[in-house]
Amino acid sequence: MQVNTCMSSHEAVAWRRYNGTMGTGDRAARRCLDCAGELLVGQSFCGHCGQRTDLARLTLHEVGHEFVHALVHADRSALSLLLSLLLRPGVVAREYVAGKRRRHFGPFSSLVVLIGATTLLSELVGFESITSSRALNGVQDFLNGHVNLIVFAQIPLLTFLCSLLFRRDRFDFVEHMVLVAYTSGLRAMLFALIVLPLWYFLHPDMNLVGESFWALWSFYFGIAAAQFYSGNRFLSWLKGALAAFVIYPATGLLINAIAAGFQYLRGL
């Protein structure tokens, strides 16, 4: 097999080893397939980048194993993260802020994935977040098709309220946002698992469902705040629940203000 001439000598040796075409003369030059760092005999992981050294060419078995591992591995899996966020969200966020990050998925990447999946599912079932007895204008129609923008707009608003209410903890803005991102990601997942099926199959009064869901999530965010912030647990819960609950009408007012401004500009 020809080795790409654009490769460095280290990369060429690594590729021949990966592809099973390395000769006996190459055996002394074991190098990491990821960073081309030199490996010692019997070394299981690269000392430079941490990648496993016993990799072979990808197979369906390898892909399947990695998928199952990502879902159910006890130390760092999607299911373990979701369970932790359900039961101890403030602890997860506090550990992440404290530097214990290898054991958890990142809050912001998790948020993007969960909100993206929820938005896609909402589109597929035809769910509309904004309803009105009157015809919706262009802004409202746009936001109905981009629910993720509404959720992302709520992140800095709730973070700002937390930074005001819990300023004695001396977290910076981004550290407050870690808690908001983790809990908002779980909110998106619960919305997809509870609210969307309920709406699709039973067609209930969505104003009542939406307000009930937000009240439940506000209660949950209060628990997360009590775990994340120091001081009196009940007071932290109360302030967290209040901050989360205020975001619901604040978001509605913001959307109505933008829609009214849009209508005004169109009338000029």
Image (cartoon, rainbow, N blue to C red):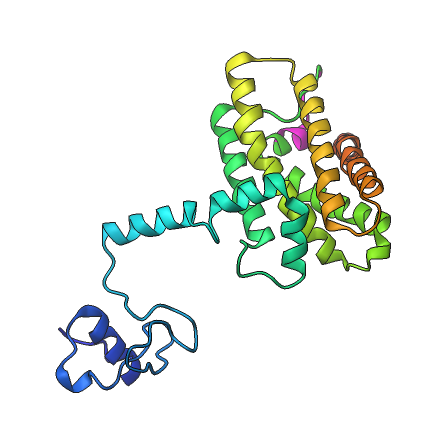
Q: Is residue 137 magenta?
A: yes
Between 164 and 85, the residue placed more toward the observer is: 85
Q: Position of residue 27 (x, y in %)?
A: 20, 83
Q: Position of residue 26 (x, y in %)?
A: 19, 84
Q: Quadrant of the C terminus?
A: top right
Q: Locate residue 251: give its quadrant.
A: top right
Q: Which stretch appears magenta?
A: 134-141
Q: Locate residue 87: give its quadrant.
A: top right
Q: Quadrant of the N terminus?
A: bottom left
Q: Position of residue 258 (x, y in %)?
A: 76, 35
In this view, 103 is above or below 122: below
- Residue 49 visible in rendering: yes
Q: Residue at x 57, y 44 (%)?
A: 84
Q: Residue at x 73, y 27 (%)?
A: 215
Q: Is residue 5 magenta?
A: no
Between 231 and 164, the residue placed more toward the observer is: 231
Q: Residue at x 19, y 69 (%)?
A: 19
In this view, 68 is above or below 31: above
Q: In the displayed structure, does residue 180 sit left or right of residue 101?
A: right
- How many marks overall? 0
Q: In the displayed structure, does residue 9 sit left or right of residue 37?
A: left
